[in-house]
Amino acid sequence: MSLFEDDFDNDDGFTDSDVSEPLSSDDLLKPPHQSSLFLGHENVENEMLSLWNSGRMPHALILNGIKGIGKATFAYRLARFILKESEGGAGGLFGDDMTPENLNVAHDHSVSSKVASGGHPDILTIARPFDERKGQFKNEIPVDDIRKVAPFLRKTSGDGGWRIVVVDDANMMNRNGQNALLKILEEPPKNALLMLVTHGAGGLLPTIRSRCRFVAFDALDDAHVSTLLNKAVDTPVMPSDGDILKAMTHGSAGQAIELLQDDGISAVHVLLGGLAQIQNLSEDQIDALALSYGKSGDAKAITQFHFILNWWFEALIDMAVKGQKTQYVGGVELEIPMGYDLKKLLMKHEEVEAHIHACLNGNLDKRYMIFKTLRMIQNDG
């Protein structure tokens, strides 16, 4: 699973009233097709249930929203429901005496166990492959993987039910990959569903967007994020830490939990503390700060550095727009460095982003990348 991916689902109907039930951090951090927690997005669930019960389930969905809010998890929740309901050729209102009232599928149901093991014959998952050498996911989904979608959906289900494809990070398809999907979208087979999970549907071709039903996922509210944060760790999250994590992740529980893992909140405080004093740091102090992130070349640490830095810039730009010089977030003081105004912040952010992307794409030394980034910020000109 990639950093900040969707992790939350619930076979057992997890709702606000269920938050007192025991739940380990392992449950929260399982990949979407195995996870046992689903929280929020009742409007999306009700919409899909209504479509199914009325026999109007679309042949293709775009599940769109920020990372870490449960989109991929919902895709598997819906897939389990459809596969269970359509066993033996049933579908929608046909074949059941009772109209389903929710998308729940029992954890011990055969469909749940097959989906969790990756062994259900009627569901196919397409996602970015993991690069073992670099320790990170590749930048795009190979077109050859996308070409598997059409023949899979055109096959007849083993038990006469539905065939389902989930394309995770669908916005990471290149143009050739997207074109490979168009034929199946233009002539969709019966009882087939394609779900495109995206963090930016604007990157999809207009011809794809026009042939799919768009489903918007809102960010989770603070109460839901707090619930998930405290379920993810063995000890309660300090309120101030919870506040800074919620502010940084804008309702993405997945990103908040990722930052919380492995004492990542300490890294947040270290970097934000260094940035608060950036103009007073010596070159040796900046080098030590860079070393704390860059010495191992760990891809996750570099991604974390980039994420925190982007949020810092965005927070300062927002402050400058509002005419604020300082602001406290979760006990952390944010202050616009001396010599910076809105124009300089925007220009410096763009300059820093170009530097980071050049270093990452050129596979350059990560410690140097961070050191140079901090020195660039220190120099307001």
Image (cartoon, helix red, strand yellow):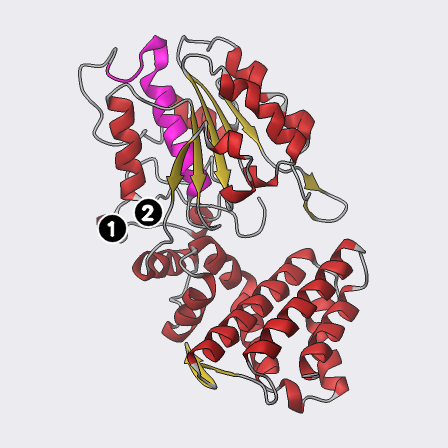
Chief secondary structure of the magenta portion: helix
User: Splitting the image into 4 quarters, where does residue 241 fall?
Assistant: bottom left
Q: Quadrant of the C terminus?
A: bottom right
Residue depicted at x 48% and y 8%? 156
Question: Which of the two labelled residues, at mark 2 and mark 1, occupies the earlier sequence position?
Answer: 1
| Residue 300 in view, yes or no | yes
Where 298 falls versus 378 (above or below)? above
Q: Distance between the Cα atoms at labels 2 and 1?
A: 7 Å
Residue depicted at x 76% and y 64%? 366
Looking at the picture, tell me which residue is in the foreground, 120 or 182.
182
Disc 1 element: helix
Left or right position of 102 against 201: left
Q: Tell me, yes or no, whether the highlighted magenta stretch contains residue 304.
A: no
- Numbered tag placed on residue 39 in the rendering: 2
Q: Tell me, yes or no, whether the highlighted magenta stretch contains residue 80.
A: yes
Q: Amino acid at mark 2?
A: Leu
The residue range painted magenta reads 71-93
Residue depicted at x 52% and y 12%? 154
Please give the residue where the numbered disc 1 appears in the rendered image. 16
Image coordinates of residue 109 in percent, x first then y, are 35, 24
